[in-house]
Amino acid sequence: MLSIHSTSIDLESVPTEIMIQAFADRILVLVTQMGKVGNLIQASIPSTTPLLSSDDLDEDGDSQTAGLPAPPAAIQLTPLLGGASSEHLQTLHSLYAAQIATIIWVEEAKRSMGVNRRSVVVGIALQKSRDADDERKIFLGVMDHLYRLVNQAG
């Protein structure tokens, strides 16, 4: 990932932009439906922590998150800027940050022999969803398009 990779998509009729930019010491990922950076959260993990890819999931994996690698328990989320307006949004933003970072670490590990995992800074600015079903569809849509961007970058 040497350059900026981005995409604009409609998820549940909401224009959504996803951007990835790699730096020497960390990776920046922005997910916005509001045209701004939003809440910034840094995800980091010790390089000795094993990661499970989506290929390692068993047959009994949760169908709602099928194909997504599980964020490791050792993941550290640090709020950097901004904050969520409710406990629900804070939990949702943490879920996005943990899942995005895990996808990037797993995909980078597939392409590299090294275990030096860069921190991932995630900016999240989402519009209020109509219901939990929309929230889930948007989440899965973002993760699907993130995979595409990461694989374009590799």
Image (cartoon, rainbow, N blue to C red):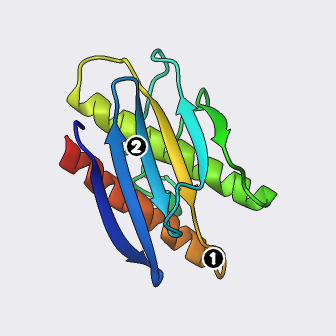
Residue for badge 1:
129
Total labels: the figure holds 2
Q: Position of residue 136 (x, y in %)?
A: 56, 69
Q: Is residue 55 visible?
A: no
Name which residue type carries label 1. Answer: Ser
Whole-Å distance between the Cαs marked 2 and 1? 24 Å
Residue drawn 53% across the image and 69% down it? 34
For residue 103, which numbered disc appears in the image?
Answer: 2
Name which residue type carries label 2. Answer: Ile
Compared across the picture, whether 114 is left or right of 135 comes to left
Q: Is residue 99 above or below residue 15?
A: above
Q: Is residue 24 above or below residue 84?
A: above
User: Mark 2 or 1, which is nearer the eye?
Assistant: 1
Q: Is residue 117 above or below residue 125?
A: above
Q: Nearer the viewer, residue 152 or 2?
A: 2
Q: Is residue 9 above or below residue 12?
A: above
Q: Secondary structure at mark 1?
A: loop
Compared across the picture, whether 20 is left or right of 15 comes to left
Residue drawn 51% across the image and 45% down it? 122
Residue drawn 30% across the image and 33% down it? 108
